[in-house]
C-alpha cells in the first residue's frame, strides 16, 4: 500500500545557506518487471534482482486503463494488468533484431477503429510495427531503414500517425493504408529551417488535426502545420532527449535534459515561456527524459522524470505547486504516463521496472 512520507531537499543556494522544503514522497502501489542487478554486480541468490534484464524506454497505459505496456531495450514489449501487475502478454522482437524499442502508442479507441488493443511501436533499427496486443501478433511492419526511429504519436482520431528520429525528418502516415503521406523537413535557406539534429518527441494537437509539435537535440520545439513542409512557429531553448514534450490546448510542456530549469510551460500561440516549475534539487540534480500533462479534462497536473536523482515529480499545472515525488529507482526515469481516467502515474526506469502510484492520496504532512 502506498503512503506519503516526507524528505528534506537542498535548494542549491549559491550562498551555501541550507534551505529545506518538505517533499511528499510516494511509495509504489505496483512494481512491474524484475529489477536489473546493479552495474558491476551479480544477482546471485538475491531475489530482488534479475540475472538478465533490460531497461524500460517507454511506458503507456491502454486507452481503457486496463493494461500497462513497457517497451524494453532488447526490443520486446511486456504488457501487464494495471490492476494486479501480472504480465499478461509478451510482444517479442525477432531474435535477429534485438534493437531497442524506443517508443510505443496504443491506437485511440474511436468509432472508426473496429479492432481494439492495437499498438504502434518504433525501434532503433528503423522499424515501425503495428501489433495486436491480445493475440501478440505483429500485423504490419514499415521500414524506415537506415533511419533510427525514436518518436511517434497518433492523431486523436487514430486515422493518422507520425514518426521521427535520427534523420531530423517528421514522417506523416495514413493508418488505414500504412502509407507515407508527407515528410516534414523544412531546410536550410528556407523561411523556417526545421530540425537540425535528432528528434526524440512528437505530439499531435487534440484540438487541431493539422497541428503537430516535435522536439529534440537541436534545442527547439517545432510547431508544424502538416499541410505545409515548414514549421509555422518555433520555441527555442528546451533540450529534448526523450518522450518529453506534450500539448494541451495552447499549452506546451517541455522536460529538458539539463540541470537547471528542466520543466517548463510555454504558450503555443506566441512561443513565449509561461512558467518554470521549481524543481528544487537534491545534492544531485535531475536531468529530465520524460514529461506529460495529466489526462483529466483540465490537465490539472504535470509530471516530469529523469536521471541524476532518479526521480519523477508531480506539480499542479496552474499554480506550479509541487505535489510530490517518486524516488527509489536505481537508474534514471526514462518514461512516464498518466492513467487515462484515474489519479495514477506509471514511471518507467532504466533499472528494468515500471512503478505505479496514486498521487491523490491525502498527504501525511
Image (spheres, grey):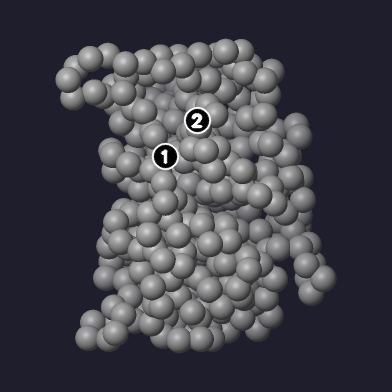
The image shows residue 147, relative to residue 81, as above or below, that is below
Whether the residues at callouts 1 and 2 have beta carbons within 8 Å, the answer is: yes
Element class at badge 1: loop
The image shows residue 247, relative to residue 59, as above or below, that is below
Given residues 132 and 213, the one toward you in this image is 213
| Residue at 61 percent of width and 43 percent of height | 300
Q: Residues within 10 Å of mark 1 (few under 14, many from 20)?
A: some
Element class at badge 2: strand
| Residue at 55 percent of width and 67 percent of height | 204
Question: Where on the picture, by quarter, is residue 214?
Answer: bottom left
Quarter of the image where the N terminus is located: top right
Given residues 280 and 162, the one toward you in this image is 280
**Earlier sequence position, callout 1 versus callout 2:** 1
Which residue is disc 1 drawn over?
Answer: 277
* Residue 148, x across and y down, in percent: 39, 66
Q: Which mark is residue 322?
A: 2
The image shows residue 2, relative to residue 190, as above or below, that is above
Quarter of the image where the C terminus is located: top right
In this rendering, the count of numbered labels is 2
Question: Where on the picture, by quarter, is residue 359?
Answer: top right
* Residue 26, x across and y down, in percent: 57, 23
Amino acid at each position: 500500500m502506498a503512503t506519503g512520507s516526507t524528505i528534506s531537499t537542498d535548494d542549491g543556494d549559491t550562498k551555501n545557506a541550507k534551505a529545506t522544503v518538505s517533499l511528499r514522497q510516494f511509495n509504489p502501489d505496483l512494481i512491474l518487471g524484475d529489477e536489473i542487478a546493479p552495474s558491476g554486480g551479480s544477482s546471485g541468490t538475491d531475489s530482488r534482482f534479475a540475472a538478465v534484464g533490460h531497461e524500460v524506454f517507454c511506458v503507456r497505459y491502454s486507452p481503457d486503463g486496463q493494461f500497462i505496456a513497457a517497451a524494453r531495450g532488447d526490443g520486446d514489449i511486456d504488457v501487464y494488468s494495471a490492476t494486479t501487475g501480472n504480465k499478461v502478454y509478451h510482444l517479442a522482437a525477432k531474435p535477429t533484431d534485438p534493437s531497442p524499442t524506443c517508443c510505443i502508442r496504443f491506437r485511440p479507441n474511436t468509432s472508426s477503429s473496429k479492432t481494439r488493443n492495437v499498438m504502434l511501436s518504433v525501434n532503433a533499427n528503423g522499424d515501425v510495427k503495428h501489433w495486436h496486443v491480445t493475440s501478440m501478433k505483429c500485423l504490419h511492419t514499415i521500414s524506415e531503414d537506415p533511419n533510427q526511429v525514436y518518436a511517434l504519436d497518433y492523431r486523436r482520431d487514430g486515422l493518422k500517425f507520425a514518426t521521427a528520429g535520427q534523420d531530423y525528418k517528421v514522417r506523416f502516415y495514413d493508418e488505414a493504408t500504412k502509407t507515407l503521406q508527407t515528410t516534414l523537413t523544412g531546410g536550410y535557406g528556407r523561411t523556417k529551417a526545421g530540425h537540425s539534429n535528432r528528434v526524440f518527441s512528437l505530439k499531435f494537437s487534440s484540438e487541431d488535426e493539422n497541428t503537430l509539435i516535435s522536439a529534440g537535440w537541436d534545442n527547439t520545439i517545432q510547431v508544424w502545420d502538416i499541410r505545409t513542409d515548414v514549421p509555422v512557429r518555433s520555441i527555442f531553448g528546451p533540450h529534448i532527449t526523450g518522450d518529453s514534450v506534450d500539448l494541451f490546448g495552447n499549452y506546451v510542456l517541455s522536460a529538458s535534459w539539463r540541470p537547471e530549469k528542466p520543466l517548463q510551460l510555454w504558450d503555443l500561440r506566441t512561443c513565449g515561456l509561461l512558467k518554470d516549475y521549481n524543481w528544487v534539487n537534491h545534492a544531485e540534480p535531475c536531468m529530465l527524459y520524460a514529461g506529460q500533462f495529466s489526462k483529466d479534462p483540465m490537465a490539472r497536473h504535470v509530471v516530469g522524470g529523469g536521471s541524476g536523482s532518479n526521480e519523477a515529480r508531480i506539480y499542479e499545472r496552474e499554480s506550479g505547486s509541487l505535489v510530490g515525488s517518486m524516488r527509489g529507482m536505481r537508474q534514471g526515469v526514462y518514461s512516464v504516463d498518466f492513467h487515462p481516467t484515474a489519479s495514477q502515474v506509471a514511471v518507467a526506469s532504466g533499472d528494468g521496472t515500471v512503478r505505479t502510484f496514486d498521487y491523490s492520496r491525502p498527504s501525511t504532512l
